[in-house]
Image (spheres, rainbow, N blue to C red):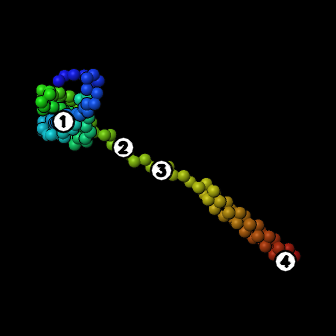
């Protein structure tokens, strides 16, 4: 009837139309992705994960119905491989408390032993006189 929606018919429910989405991949292979339904203004969308990188030819086709003739449109999309990321390593941290404590304790013990030995030798020398 070609009348505006906001005019004569106030209680009209507008529905979308089926849209076939087809693809030709970079290797020239044709495949049907899916058939989606447009919104009331003819807009639609679709997401998928391509299997290979390269340029894809994407065609959307409306077969037509009693109100509208058929139509189609084509677009192109380039897909690139995701960059390879190297796993990040956790930085190695040294516990400086332990790294310094053990040599410090060993040094103190060595000094105490050296003083004890010197004291023992001195006492032995004093006793002999």
Q: Nearer the viewer, mark 1 or mark 2?
A: 1
The relative height of residue 49 versus residue 66 in the rendered view (above or below) is: below
- For mark 4, what is the residue? 128
Which of the pair 81/11 is nearer the observer? 11
For the point 61% across and 59% down, which residue is it? 98
Q: Position of residue 68 (x, y in %)?
A: 14, 27
Which of the pair 87/102 is nearer the observer? 87
Q: Position of residue 86 (x, y in %)?
A: 38, 45
Which of the pair 115/82 is nearer the observer? 82
For the point 17% across and 24% down, which residue is it? 1
Is residue 43 visible to us here? Answer: no
Q: From mark 1 to mark 2, how far is it between C-alphas?
A: 40 Å
- For mark 1, what is the residue? 18
Q: From mark 4 to mark 3, how far is it between C-alphas?
A: 65 Å
For the point 59% across and 55% down, which residue is it? 95
* Label 3: element kind: loop
């Amino acid at each position: 009837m070609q009348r505006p929606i906001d005019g004569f018919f106030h209680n009209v429910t507008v529905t979308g139309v089926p849209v076939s989405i087809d693809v030709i991949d970079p290797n020239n292979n044709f495949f049907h992705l899916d058939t989606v339904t447009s919104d009331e203004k003819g807009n639609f969308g679709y997401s998928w994960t391509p299997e290979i990188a390269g340029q894809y030819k994407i065609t959307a086709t409306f077969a037509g119905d009693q109100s509208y003739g058929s139509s189609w449109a084509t677009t192109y999309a380039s897909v690139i491989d995701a960059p390879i990321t190297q796993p990040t390593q956790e930085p190695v941290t040294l516990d400086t408390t332990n790294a310094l404590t053990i040599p410090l304790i060993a040094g103190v013990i060595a000094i105490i032993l050296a003083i004890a030995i010197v004291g023992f030798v001195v006492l032995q020398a004093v006793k002999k006189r």
